[in-house]
Every structure is written in structure tokens, then in C-alpha cells.
Amino acid sequence: MLSLAILISGRGSNMENILKAVKKNKIPIKPVIVISNKPDARGLAIAQKIGIRTEIIDSNGFKGGNWEYDSKLVSVLEKHGVTPQNGLICLAGFMRIMSPEFIRHYKGRIMNIHPAILPAFPGLHSQRQALEYGVKYSGCTVHFVDEGVDTGPIILQSVVKIKDNDTEESISKKILKQEHKIYPKAVKLFAKGKIKIVGRKTVIS
Ligand code: GAR
């Protein structure tokens, strides 16, 4: 069976949702470790309560995209059996850029959730970017991670309507609800071997 690692930096609601979905929907994947780069991430206590091991690898002092930091991640992941042969790594609000070395090591096995319909509004504060731009629809995207920022092959997307009276907070809430729907679906598709990467696209069978 595949081994699942989830990387977080904060609240951990996507992590919680994936862990619960794995249990409930019998997704054929074994969650083995939750790693946070922030010692005070709220999601750590949630993971422990669910019964998943946690580790903190503090990124304080390490710039994003830094291999010295990411090699520590690889050591911890491999210690828990998350390998390039049998692992899936879900970034769930993990607010760091991964190094090219890390991405190459786990090629095609790292997923991310982004709170916008990519390629629109990559990077930070996507919900605010969408509101300020004045789009009528936004949403979320699950994608594989490649060496760019939020540029990897798209797996699933879900759209939400933006109303005139929406705020950054209300949009974020609507989008998060959709994130919780599509991220577990993407994990399930991957675990069942149903996602093929073809060039910069994915084909789902
Ligand atoms: C989510 O909205 C996720 O899409 C976003 O951070 C939030 C984490 O929430 N990720 C990014 O912006 C990545 N660029 P969570 O910790 O409750 O899952």
C-alpha cells in the first residue's frame, strides 16, 4: 500500500479532512506522518488526536527552496517509509517553496492545494487577489508540484461564485469548503492509480 505524508504550516483543516476521508472512504493509502515547518501549527494537535505521528522540522532561518532544509524533510519522510517508489506527499497549507532537488526526488508524487483556479492568482493571498481583480468566479485547484510556483499539472478544480458583497473572509470560507471536497478525491484517484501525467496535463481514468 502507498504511504501518505501530509505537510502543514498552520490550521490543518485540509489535513484533517484528508485523514478522515482516508479512514471513512477506505482510500487505499496509509497515512504515516504529518510534518509541520512551524512548531506552533494548530494542525499538529489535530493529527495527534486522530492518531497519526507528527514531526516538527522548524524552517526558521531557512529560505524557501533551500535544499539544506528539504534534505531534512527527505530524511524524516524516508524514516517513516515515504519513498519515491511508494509515497504520496500532500502539501496542505504548507507555506514554503520546495527545492528543485526535493521535487525531482519525489517526482510526480507531491500534490498541493491552491485556493484559486490556476493559472490565475498563484502565490500568496489568492483569495484577496481574486477579490481585488474583480473576478466573478474563483475556486481551488489540486495539482502536482513541479519546479515552478503553483504551475504543475492540474488534477482537479472546483469553482465558486463571487458575489458583490463577498469579503476576503467569505470567499476564503466558500473556497475552503470546495478544497475539502476535491483534495480527498485527488488522493483517492492517486491511491487507485488513476492519474497519469502526460506532459503538463493529467489524464484521469
Ligand atoms: C488553504 O486555503 C490552502 O488552499 C492554502 O492555505 C490554506 C490552508 O488551510 N494554501 C495556499 O495558499 C498555498 N499557496 P488549512 O491549513 O486549514 O488546510
Image: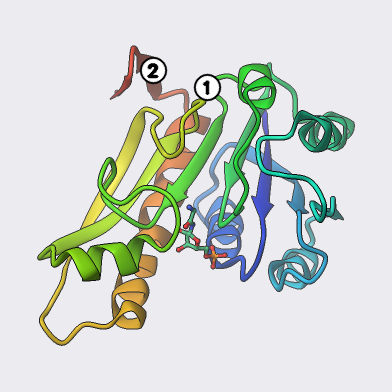
Residue drawn where x is 76% and y is 54% of the image: 37
**x and y percent of residue 118 in the render?**
29, 44
In this rendering, is residue 96 above or below 205? below
Nearest to the observer: residue 66 or residue 173: 66
**x and y percent of residue 82 in the render?**
75, 30
The quarter in which the C terminus is drawn is: top left
Instruction: Using a 10 Å C-alpha cutoff, classify the residue at mark 1 as few (fewer than 14 neighbours), some (14 to 19) or many (20 or more).
Output: some
Determine the CA span between mark 2 and mark 1: 8 Å
Residue drawn where x is 38% and y is 33% of the image: 151
Q: Residue 197 shows which numbered tag?
A: 2
Kind of residue at disc 1: Gly
Nearest to the observer: residue 149 or residue 44: 149
Name the side, left or right, on which 24 lies relative to 165.
Answer: right
Kind of residue at disc 2: Ile
Q: Which residue is mark 1?
A: 108
Q: Secondary structure at mark 1?
A: loop
Q: Which of the 4 image quarters holds residue 195?
A: top left
In this rendering, is residue 79 above or below 184? above
Query: Dots 2 and 1: beta carbons under 8 Å?
Result: yes
Name the side, left or right, on which 32 lies relative to 182.
Answer: right
